[in-house]
């Protein structure tokens, strides 16, 4: 069978479902979710006619949460709802064949869908870039199995190749020491669990951990002497992706450290102030060595929705209205950015900061180079002696 005939006889929706099923077992929960999002956008773009009889949100939900979720679609204990089945049956009948990828207009429509939100506004550049990477994998699968001859997606600096993703962080997102201190103080004064939340955010601000690394810490992962510096042994991350995407059915997925080999660890110093705070938390909450260092209310993993809500309340209470509306500390992840920038600005060599942070040096410098300040005068003094012209009389 030729490429053209195989493409014409293969339904895009059927192909997309097969791709999900074939790759599900070897991909992370977060990647599964992102694949479902990308395939949903493209599938809607490759329908013969718009699904006017269904609400757009319900169509996308049916595709994302059922059609492109192998776990839910094949779970005998949880049958697919009738309304979802009706939508997906209609989509299957009304989806174009794979030969649509040979039509430049259809390719343009699919590419446009990858960069557009449901309300018609443009998606973030990072989301568009991620969607493009995913679709290149999907098309590569089609080529490998003899359905398509070549990759029709735009490449390089061609029109429609996608917006440029800025690696460097926005300097406006960084918090100054006074802001950090005020936020941590406000959080620490909250009733019941304020001290624990204060210690969680202080860990991000002092040790530069990613939130998904901090929630996974056990008491035994921290060396906390009575005086002086302590040490974290960071060895896993627990990103929050949703129970429908994980193999275990838990909201968090246990992963190795980002950018590290399987089973690898990294050591991070703990500031004496943070050591004292963590010792206080452990004593107050009677935590054992095997317990989570920052447990949720019911003893499980601290939920992202909880710590994001605490952080937002703190920003709203502490920062003036114009700063609250600004990017300053808008995301919990900005605590890590603030920490790493502080280390670099204190003259800690990038190689050492990268080791503590779990980044490579090139990535670290690409992200934080614009935020390194306070050393310009020293740099100029160093090169002042390099002269090629005679001194002025």
Image (tube, rainbow, N blue to C red):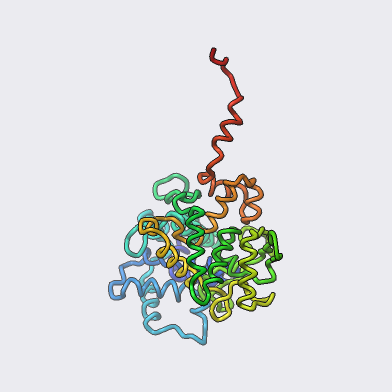
Figure disc tally: 0
Residue 239 x, y percent position in the rendering: 55, 68
Q: Quadrant of the C terminus?
A: top right
Left of 90 or right of it: where is 262? right
Residue 369 location, quadrant: top right
Q: Nearer the viewer, residue 372 or 190?
A: 190
Whether residue 55 is situated above or below residue 269 in the rendered picture: below
Answer yes or no: is residue 234 visible: yes
Determine the residue positioned at 39% across, 80% down: 84
Residue 36 x, y percent position in the rendering: 47, 68
Q: Nearer the viewer, residue 208 or 230?
A: 230
Determine the residue positioned at 55% across, 81% down: 298
Residue 232 location, quadrant: bottom right
Left of 29 or right of it: where is 173? left
Answer yes or no: is residue 106 visible: no
Whether residue 63 is situated above or below residue 149 in the rendered picture: below
Q: Nearer the viewer, residue 244 or 320?
A: 320
Residue 253 x, y percent position in the rendering: 58, 71
Determine the residue positioned at 57% across, 75% down: 301
* Residue that extends furthest to the left in the rendered view of this protein: 52
* Residue that extends furthest to the top in the rendered view of this protein: 393
């Amino acid at each position: 069978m030729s490429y053209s005939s195989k493409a014409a006889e293969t339904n895009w929706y059927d192909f997309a479902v097969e791709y999900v099923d074939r790759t599900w077992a070897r991909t992370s929960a977060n990647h599964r979710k992102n694949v479902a999002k990308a395939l949903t956008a493209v599938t809607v773009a490759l329908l013969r006619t718009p699904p006017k009889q269904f609400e757009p949100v319900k169509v996308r939900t049916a595709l994302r949460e059922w059609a492109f979720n192998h776990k839910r679609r094949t779970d005998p204990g949880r049958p697919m709802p009738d309304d979802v089945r009706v939508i997906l049956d209609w989509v299957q009948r009304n989806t174009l064949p794979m030969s649509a990828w040979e039509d430049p207009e259809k390719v343009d429509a699919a590419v446009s869908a990858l960069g557009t939100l449901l309300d018609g506004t443009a998606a973030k550049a990072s989301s568009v870039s991620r969607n493009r990477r995913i679709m290149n994998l999907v098309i590569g699968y089609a080529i490998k199995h003899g359905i398509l001859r070549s990759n029709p997606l735009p490449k390089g600096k061609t029109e429609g190749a996608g917006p440029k993703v800025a690696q460097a962080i926005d300097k406006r997102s960084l918090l100054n020491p006074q802001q950090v201190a005020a936020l941590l103080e406000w959080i620490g004064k909250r009733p019941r669990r304020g001290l624990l939340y204060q210690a969680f955010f202080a860990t991000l601000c002092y040790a530069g951990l990613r939130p998904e690394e901090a929630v996974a810490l056990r008491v035994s992962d921290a060396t906390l002497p009575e005086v002086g510096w302590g040490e974290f042994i960071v060895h896993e991350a627990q990103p929050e992706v949703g129970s429908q995407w994980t193999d275990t059915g838990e909201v968090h997925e246990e992963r190795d450290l980002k950018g590290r080999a399987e089973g690898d660890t990294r050591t991070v110093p703990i500031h004496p102030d943070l050591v004292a705070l963590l010792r206080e938390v452990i004593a107050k909450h009677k935590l054992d060595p095997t317990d989570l260092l920052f447990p949720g209310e019911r003893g499980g993993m601290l939920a992202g929705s909880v710590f994001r809500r605490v952080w937002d309340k703190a920003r709203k209470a502490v920062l003036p209205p114009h700063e609250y509306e600004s990017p300053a500390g808008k995301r919990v992840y900005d605590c890590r950015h603030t920490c790493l920038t502080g280390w670099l600005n204190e003259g800690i060599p990038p190689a050492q900061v990268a080791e503590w942070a779990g980044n490579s040096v090139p990535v670290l410098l690409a992200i934080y180079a614009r935020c390194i300040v306070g050393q310009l005068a020293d740099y100029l003094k160093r090169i002042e002696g390099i002269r090629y012209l005679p001194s002025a009389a």
